[in-house]
Each structure stands twice: as structure tokens, then as C-alpha cells.
Amino acid sequence: MPHAQRNQMSNSSSITQFLLLAFADTRELQLLHFWLFLGIYLAALLGNGLIIITIACDHHLHTPMYFFLLNLSLLDLGSISTTVPKSTANSLWDTTSISYSGCVAQVFMFLYFISAEYSFLTIMSYDRYVAICKPLHYGTLLGTRACVHMAAAAWGAGFLNALLHTANTFSLPLCQGNAVEQFFCEIPHILKLSCSHSHVGESGYLGVSAALAFGSFVFIVVSYVQIFRAVLRIPSEQGRHKAFSTCLPHLAVVSLFVSTAMFANLKSPSISFPILDLVVSLLYSVVPPTLNPLIYSLRNQQLKDAASKLMAGFFKHH
């Protein structure tokens, strides 16, 4: 990079845009990326949208478990809509730029949705734990008021976490150019652009967030261990199978989400291979929102019946 250009970017006020990582440099591969990402996005939109509409329209599904699932689907829609459409549009128009304010908004919104989603995954493990291990107390521990309070706390905590990290990240002076080596604005990659040592504070904040996330993960694992112990005591083979088939996929999604998100945000900047960073980010930002509807609905007969009833009614009226 020429010296004059580097000087011009030496303070962050002069950066008006960031350059995102291009998935491909040939036109054919760019268009392939466009269609692939568009397909993934539409699948996530359709799956999560169907869950939201089905739960909202069917009063039989107005229970704590489905209330939390509806929130999870809203957050999945939000998180995938923050990252994928911009990357898809960039591939279509053969550009890599994102405006400074667009990048700030992307960091904030993505963190907001991801943090709140993690809180809901934690709450959902607690919901399953109470339902299977303390069924007689379910009505009191997860009454309407308790569910609303838990949901409000999850959305609120996500907002505060996103606000703290975004404000902290973008208050740092950036003097290493404006190329973000990722397909969306991700904090570790923006920290790499900051002047040396000035990003230690934000790395510390990321560490605290990771510690809290790990605490939640331990809570989730303990909940599932208790659930599995209770399930193994169920005398009927069918009952055991049903409980396992709902809990194991939940645990798989949570594990994938947590391990990849923590790896992306906590690994040392020296271990940086563009292809590895890309795969890890795809695993926690794109895969869960697309797979969650399949995992939470295909294994759930009640939800499948309600969705097919809703669609049958819709087509009959049209």
C-alpha cells in the first residue's frame, strides 16, 4: 500500500468505507456464490418464517416451549439477514465495499441477535429440563410472567452486550488500512485494523463475554445431563426415543454454535488463515439459522401438524 494512502487512512475518521472479503475473483464463481447464498438465505427465511407464523396462529402452540422457539426463529432471521444479503449483493454487483456506518450497524445488529439467541438456547435447555425432570412444577416455574421476564432479559442482555462491544470497537483508532478479511464486519477482523496495543481492552471485553458464554454452556450441558439421566429411567422405549430425538439435535446445534463462535472471537490473531476464518464464521453465522428450523420442527410432530394444517387452510382460501 502506498505511503500516502496509508497516511490518509491513519485515523479512523478518514475511513468512509471498509472492504469485505470477496469469495471469488472470477465472475462465474461470484455468481455461484450469489446463487448459493441466495438459496441458503431463502431457505432460512422460509423455515423460520413458517415456524413464526405457525406458532403465532395456532393457539395449541401457545406454550412456553413454542414461545421460546418463536423468539429463536425471530433472532435467526435477524442474524442471517444482517450478514448474508450484503455479501450476496456484493457478489452480484462485483464489489466488496460496505460503508463505515453500514459496518457499524452490521457489527451491532449481528452481535445483538447472536447474543440474544444464545440466551434463548440457554433458556430452552432450562425449559426442557423442567419439563422432563420436574414436570409437576412446570406450570409454576414457567408461568406466563416468568416466560415474558426471561425473554425480555434475553433481548435486553443481547442489546447491552452489542452496544458495549460496538461502541468499544469503533472508538479505537484504525491505522492498518480498511480491508476486513471476512465476508461481514466481524469484531476480531476490525481489531486487526486498529493501531497496535489499542485493541487490548476490546480483547479483554471479548474474553469476559466468552467467559459468560462458557458459563451458560456449562449450564446447558448440566441441564442436558440431568435430562438424559431422567430419560434413561423412562420405562418405555418409545418415550426414551422421543426425549432423545428432541434433546440431542438441540445439544448438537448449541455445541456447534458455541465452539465456532468462541474460536472465531478468541483465537490469537497470529493464527489467521483466511479459509479457516471463513469456514468458522460460516459455521456460527449462517449454518445455525438455516438448520434450526429443520432441527426444531422436523422432529416435532405437533409443530409439523400445525404447519400443514395452516398451509392447507391457506391454499383452500386461495
Image (cartoon, rainbow, N blue to C red):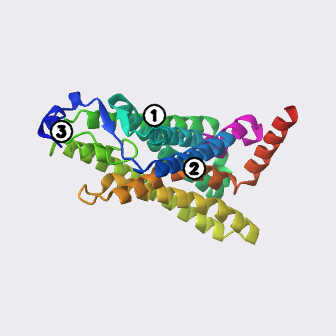
50 is within the stretch colored magenta? no
Kindly report the distance in space between the C-alpha atoms of the residues bearing marks 1 and 2: 24 Å
User: Relative to the observer, which residue lies in front, 277 or 36?
Assistant: 36
The quarter of the image holding the C terminus is top right
Q: Kindly report which numbered mark, 1 or 3, lies closer to the viewer in this rendering.
A: 3
Q: Are marks 1 and 3 in contact (CB under 8 Å)?
A: no
- Pick the quarter of the image with the N terminus: top left
Cβ–Cβ below 8 Å for labels 3 and 2?
A: no
What residue does disc 2 label?
Answer: 290
- Closer to the camera in the image, 205 or 219: 205
Q: How many callouts does the rendering have?
A: 3
Magenta span covers which residues?
Answer: 52-70
* Circle 3 residue: 175
Q: Is residue 43 visible?
A: yes
Q: What residue sits 27% from the left and 60% below the top?
A: 271
| Residue ID for mark 1 | 156
Query: What is the magenta segment's predominant secondary structure?
Result: helix
38 vs 239: above or below = above
